[in-house]
Image: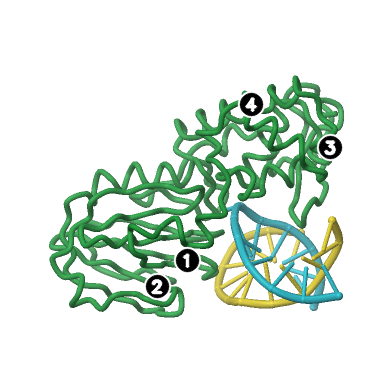
Chain colours: A green, B yellow, C cyan
Amino acid sequence: MPELPEVQTIIDDLSKYLIGKSIDKLNIPTPSICRKHVPKSSRLKGVKIQSLDRRGKHILVNLTNNQTMIVHLKMTGKLIYIDNATEIAKHTHFIMIFDSGELHFNDIRRFGFIDFVNSDKLDKIPYLSGLGPDALDISTPEFISKLRSRNKPIKSALMDQNIIAGLGNIYADESLFSAGIRPSRIASSLSRKRLEKLYQSMREILRIAIQARGSSVSDYVDGSGIPGTFQNQHKVYGRTGLPCVKCGAAIKRQVLAGRSSHYCSRCQR
DNA sequence: GACAACCTGACC
DNA sequence: GGTCAGGTTGTC
């Protein structure tokens, strides 16, 4: 589910609730969602939450024992803080229990995962070290040079986490609409000027989306379990057949890199 | 590139 | 019954 704005919203929320909390124990109903070395509850007792961080769409929970818990929510994962947990929702696979309050990892499709790694060795974790610069950190020249060298559809390049980290299907589509670029256009064929426009569009979309606390299309909720509102501002994503907000032409859908792309064939060239 | 795989659920 | 879904990885 979550892309950069959703993950950022969750981290901002959870930071407020979790930093300084002391771990009591873990409850892991579905051990298979954990990658290899999940520490025993007894070794985490008394360890505190130091800070939360984001790498692309990965959530990093830094602990005071020099370990980092990494969470990827994939399509339907949720990470929710519950003050007074009285029940365990369906599809809850991992629970971190504090001296007060609990952190629940819930994932209907079970694509997501939780990993524990040494905080000093984050850069050696293959799925983190391969990530490109963050969509909110990358500079204009770097953005342009990275995309100009790719001979594939701009939509596919935007979603490639090893080129730029953070964008997924919704924000790639919305950024391209805002920039007036058709998703199927080969990245290397776009002028510097058009890529600069795309850079600005992407930043603006992400900024507004974070302000709106992310997009809730079906499953996404924030760190308290509350939906976001940016879905109300989507201009092309999920609007196949509906009129373009700019020109009124019907929004089209085309599959690219195995994913639905939504665009206006009149406004986007 | 295209496609299947990993899963569950919603919708037609 | 089939299609589709905010992601990623591995296979032709």
Looking at numbered disc 1 in the image, what kind of residue is underneath it? Asp
Which residue sits at x=74%, y=53%? A259
Q: Which chain carries label 2?
A: A
Percent across and percent down for residue C2 are: 81, 71
Q: What residue type is labelled 4?
A: Pro
Residue at which label 3 appears: A185
Confirm or deny contact between disc 1 and disc 2 (CB under 8 A).
Answer: yes
Residue annotated with mark 2: A93
Circles 3 and 2 in contact, beta carbons < 8 Å = no
User: How far apart in space, not on screen, are marks 2 and 4 (Cα)?
Assistant: 42 Å
Residue type at mark 3?
A: Arg
Does label 2 lie on the same chain as label 3? yes
Give coordinates of residue A34: x percent, y percent. 42, 74
Residue at screen point 17% across, 51% down: A20
N-terminal-most mark, 2 or 4: 2
Q: What is the number of the mark on residue A107?
A: 1
Task: Say which residue label 4 marks.
Answer: A141
C-alpha separation, residue under disc 3 versus residue under disc 1: 34 Å
Residue type at tag 2:
His
Binning the other alpha carbons within 10 Å of mark 1 as few (below 14), some (14 to 19) or many (20 upward) gives many
Q: Nearer the viewer, residue A175 or A36?
A: A36
In the visual, does A257 lie left or right of A88?
right
